[in-house]
Image (tube, grey):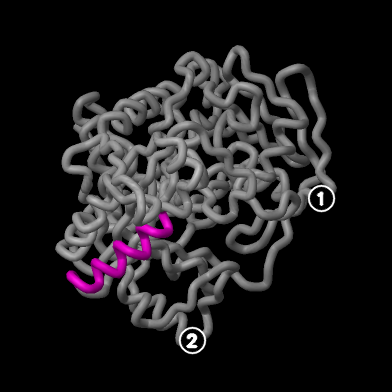
């Protein structure tokens, strides 16, 4: 049996400290936590930085390092620094160094890096080793070269290699969410289907329970399956909460693809052992003939300014889309005449359909809406110029030419907010590897007193 303690869904989200302490008393074999994902958009991969504050990250990591010391087991983080870029791994190492120095600890740290040089991916593309997922943009060597960061998602084999170094702490770059949990159970001969399925259920901590904010859960893996136990006092795992998590961030509720194969839970059985614990058996791991890893890449998309106007006039609120369409057309034409091409202008209506746009077929509008103007351009100067041209339209543009000029509200002065460089995802592909390690690097360092 292998016990994996998962403090929360991601470092920086927070967790119930009492639940974590309760988990340590269960004598886990490893403490594993995720560090991020693509949920918050391409900026973090584009810049190689974390979305979480350094202070919050350090505070929680200090507690987990103390928990590791008490339990006497490895501490592992995957997708360090939100994006898992090599620079984010180094950032997490710096934080770990600071804590080790402050607590007078000497530690062995394994660093698993997932960053990919553009030349490697371009060569693999030419060799037919890069395959698009759906949906995926068309790519070329030039597009690949424009990426500021490219990462490959490491699998269980890579985490196993890091653990085999005997490291006290493993800081991994971009990994699949499940790899950091499944690696040790697989290495110790637990049921492969159960290892991957339990890892999927545990990837977000207590999200698969009745008390998601409690954070900490314990998963026990064995030769036939796994058992999930929440560590929060009020948290409960039920067959419903556990089985439903296969729907989370997954297009197929029965199949989950990972490096080297896929998980099939079609015949899985979920059994409530009591009012808190769920036992799962019957999951299958199906190995593939090729070993592939997912690629993620981000590149600069331009420079951006944003403006926000608040509209309360009933007639304008009722006709807000027509008003915005007219502004987009007239402002864009004026900006091209006076500033040139090389920009885009978009107005999103907050309070109507800003989230889904035309896909929102049941949008409801209240007494007030916010109109968010987004200008993206090839240069910062161009973005600023178009945003300033947009300003009087948002403030005073009438619905028709034959009526009084309205006045709306800007919550800020100036209303133009410089967002600087913005990034876009441009890779959603898989890379075929002859050897799982050919796209990853592993090193160990000694830190502390």
Q: Is residue 106 above or below residue 45?
A: above
Residue 124 figure quarter = bottom left
- Circles 2 and 1, Cβ within 8 Å, touching? The answer is no
First of labels 2, 1 by sequence position: 2
Q: Position of residue 55 (x, y in %)?
A: 26, 30
State yes or no: residue 387 in magenta: no
* Magenta range: 324-339
Q: Secondary structure at mark 1?
A: loop
Left or right, 330 with respect to 321, comes to left
Q: Which residue is mark 2?
A: 127
Tell me, for residue 266, which label it has, or none: 1
Q: Secondary structure at mark 2?
A: loop
* Quadrant of image for the N terminus: top right
Instruction: Name the residue: 71% across, 19% down.
Output: 276
Most foreground residue, 72 or 409: 409
State yes or no: residue 332 in magenta: yes
Instruction: Name the residue: 19% across, 32% down.
Output: 449
Q: Position of residue 446 (x, y in %)?
A: 26, 43
Within-10-Å neighbours for mark 2: few <14, some 14–19, many 20+:
few
Q: Position of residue 39 (x, y in %)?
A: 46, 47
Left or right, 86 with respect to 269, comes to left
Number of disc labels = 2
Left or right, 311 with respect to 235, comes to left
Q: Is residue 42 above or below residue 210?
A: below
Instruction: Name the residue: 46% across, 40% down.
Output: 315
Q: CA distance from mark 2 to mark 1?
A: 36 Å
Within-10-Å neighbours for mark 1: few <14, some 14–19, many 20+:
few
Majority secondary structure of magenta residues? helix
Instruction: Name the residue: 53% across, 47% down.
Output: 177
Most foreground residue, 78 or 393: 393
Q: Is residue 371 above or below residue 113?
A: above
Q: Is residue 258 above or below residue 216?
A: below
């Amino acid at each position: 049996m292998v016990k994996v303690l998962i403090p929360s869904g991601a470092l920086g989200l927070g967790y119930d400290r009492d639940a974590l302490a309760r988990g340590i008393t269960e004598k886990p074999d490893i403490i594993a936590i995720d560090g991020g994902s693509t949920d918050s958009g391409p900026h973090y991969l584009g810049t190689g930085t974390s979305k979480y504050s350094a202070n919050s990250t350090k505070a929680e990591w200090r507690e987990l390092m103390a928990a590791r010391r008490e339990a006497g087991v490895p501490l592992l983080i995957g997708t360090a620094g939100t994006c898992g870029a090599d620079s984010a791994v180094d950032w997490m190492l710096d934080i770990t160094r600071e804590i080790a120095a402050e607590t007078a600890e000497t530690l062995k740290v394994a660093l698993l890096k997932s960053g990919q040089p553009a030349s490697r991916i371009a060569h693999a593309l030419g060799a037919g080793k890069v395959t698009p997922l759906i949906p995926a943009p068309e790519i070329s060597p030039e597009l690949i070269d424009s990426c500021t960061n490219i990462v490959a998602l490491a699998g269980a084999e890579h985490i196993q290699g890091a653990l085999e170094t005997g490291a006290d702490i493993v800081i991994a770059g971009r990994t699949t969410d499940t790899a950091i949990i499944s690696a040790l159970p697989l290495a110790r001969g637990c049921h492969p289907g159960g290892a991957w399925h339990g890892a999927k259920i545990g990837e977000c901590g207590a999200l698969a329970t009745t008390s998601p904010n409690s954070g900490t859960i314990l998963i026990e893996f064995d030769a036939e399956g796994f058992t999930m136990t929440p560590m929060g006092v009020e948290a409960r795992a039920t067959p419903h909460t556990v089985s439903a998590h296969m729907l989370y961030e997954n297009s197929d509720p029965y199949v989950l693809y990972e490096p080297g194969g896929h998980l099939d839970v079609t015949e899985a059985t979920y059994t409530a052992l009591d009012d808190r614990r769920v036992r799962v058996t019957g999951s299958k791991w199906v190995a593939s003939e090729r070993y592939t890893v997912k690629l993620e890449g981000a590149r600069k998309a331009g420079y951006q300014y944003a403006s926000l106007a608040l509209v309360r006039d009933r007639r304008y609120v009722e006709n807000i889309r027509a008003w915005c369409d007219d502004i987009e057309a007239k402002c864009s034409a004026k900006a091209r005449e006076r500033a040139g091409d090389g920009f885009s202008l978009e107005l999103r209506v907050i309070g109507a359909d800003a989230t889904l746009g035309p896909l929102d077929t049941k949008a409801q509008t209240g007494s007030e809406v916010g109109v968010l103007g987004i200008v993206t351009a090839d240069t910062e100067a161009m973005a600023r110029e178009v945003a300033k041209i947009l300003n009087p339209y948002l403030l005073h543009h009438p619905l028709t030419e034959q009526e009084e000029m309205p006045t709306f509200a800007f919550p800020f002065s100036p209303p133009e907010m410089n967002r600087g460089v913005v990034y876009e995802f441009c890779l959603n592909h898989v890379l075929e590897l002859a050897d799982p390690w050919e796209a990853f690097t592993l090193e160990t360092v000694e830190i502390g007193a």
